[in-house]
């Protein structure tokens, strides 16, 4: 009996070691992918966007009177390490069983590296209101005239379901912000009322999201040739490309869900403190 149990334990140990090795390999490859996608740079851009948004919240909801506590809360909410880890978790979960090697192979090529650099540069540039308006106007102009480049950008949006996923993420974030306000006792609103309020914004959010998204993509990919953009679209349609897209949205949606709720609570706490 002891011999049999020892063999079972030994077999179990081998399985555990094998599983640990596979997990370590998976984690290492996700880290390589995060590096290839320049996610550290993207998180810094997201933090900059968030700090700008927090200043708008301070002006619009706190009459510009946000305290030092408000500033510290905002700094904590947009913590780059936590945002990165939340995004990594969503990405890693979606990529389980996918052809991660194919994804790495694409983004570690000079073309893949260039695409990531262009995407991040355009995302950072869109933080400037004047540049954002130029990008939006460019899309409005092209939408009237049409053309192959606009068709390719629309094909890219369709392949990755970018419009619907972004609209859904925005609606979820707004709902979580209302939840944070409500849980912080900033106002008394039922669940049904919050959902109704969020859905009332859907049409406006969709129109704004489409214009921002198309303007951003047209600017980001302007330096690419049609052939390079077609290759990126082709990759996006593969199983590996679809898994990556799903993982990125899962990770970013989880991150923005946490951020939006925390911002709502922080606003509520600041409002309560100002009334004391």
Image: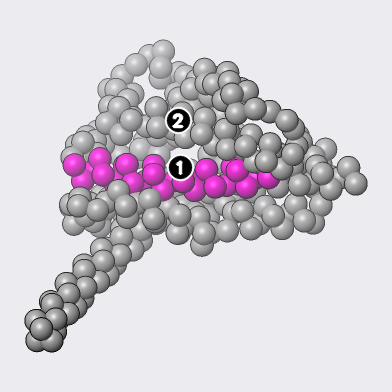
The verdict on residue 111 being magenta is no
- Per the rendering, the mark at residue 253 is 1
Can residue 115 be seen at all in this image of the molecule? Answer: no
Farthest residue toward the bottom? Answer: 2
Q: Is residue 255 left or right of residue 68?
A: left
Ranked by sequence position, the earlier of labels 2 and 1 is 2
Residue 144 at x, y = what percent? 41, 13
Name the residue: 56% across, 29% down.
Answer: 133
Name the residue: 69% across, 55% down.
Answer: 73
Farthest residue toward the top? Answer: 144
Q: Which quadrant of the figure has residue 215?
A: top left
Q: Nearer the viewer, residue 218 or 36?
A: 36
Q: Is residue 209 left or right of residue 20?
A: right
Task: Measure the alpha-carbon separation of dots 2 and 1.
Answer: 9 Å
Farthest residue toward the right? Answer: 276
* Dot 2: element: helix
Q: Quadrant of the N terminus?
A: bottom left
Rendered view: 243 above or below 82? above
Name the residue: 73% across, 54% down.
Answer: 71
Q: Nearer the viewer, residue 32 or 247?
A: 247
Q: Main secondary structure of the magenta part?
A: helix
Q: Which residue is mark 2?
A: 168
The verdict on residue 247 being magenta is yes
Q: How is the image coloured?
A: one colour
Q: Is residue 12 left or right of residue 74?
A: left
Residue 220 at x, y = what percent? 40, 39
Total marks drawn?
2
Give the magenta part as a residue range.
239-265
The crowding category of the residue bearing disc 1, from other C-alpha atoms within 10 Å (few below 14, some 14 to 19, many at least 20), is many
- Per the rendering, the mark at residue 85 is none
Residue 161 at x, y = what percent? 33, 30
């Amino acid at each position: 009996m002891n011999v049999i149990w020892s063999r079972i334990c030994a077999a179990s140990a081998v399985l555990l070691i094998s599983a640990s090795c596979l997990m370590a390999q998976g984690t290492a490859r996700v880290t390589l992918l995060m590096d290839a996608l320049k996610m550290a740079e993207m998180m810094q851009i997201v933090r900059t966007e968030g700090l700008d948004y927090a200043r708008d919240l301070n002006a619009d909801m706190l009459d510009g009177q946000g305290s030092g506590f408000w500033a510290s809360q905002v700094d904590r909410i947009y913590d780059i390490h936590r945002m990165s880890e939340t995004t990594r978790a969503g990405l890693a979960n979606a990529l389980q069983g996918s052809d991660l090697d194919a994804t790495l192979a694409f983004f570690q090529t000079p073309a893949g590296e260039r695409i990531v650099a262009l995407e991040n540069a355009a995302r950072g540039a869109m933080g400037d209101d004047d540049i954002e308006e130029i990008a939006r106007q460019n899309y409005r102009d092209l939408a009237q005239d049409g053309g192959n480049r606009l068709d390719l950008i629309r094909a890219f949006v369709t392949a990755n379901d970018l419009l619907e996923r972004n609209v859904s993420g925005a609606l979820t974030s707004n709902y979580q912000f209302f939840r944070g306000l409500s849980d912080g006792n900033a106002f008394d609103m039922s669940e049904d009322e919050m959902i109704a309020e969020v859905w009332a914004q859907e049409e406006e959010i969709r129109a704004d999201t489409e214009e921002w998204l198309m303007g951003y993509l047209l600017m980001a990919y302007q330096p690419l040739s049609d052939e390079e953009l077609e290759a990126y679209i082709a990759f996006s349609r593969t199983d590996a490309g679809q898994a990556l897209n799903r993982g990125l949205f899962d990770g970013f949606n989880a991150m923005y869900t946490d951020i939006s709720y925390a911002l709502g609570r922080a606003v509520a706490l600041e409002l309560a403190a100002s009334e004391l």
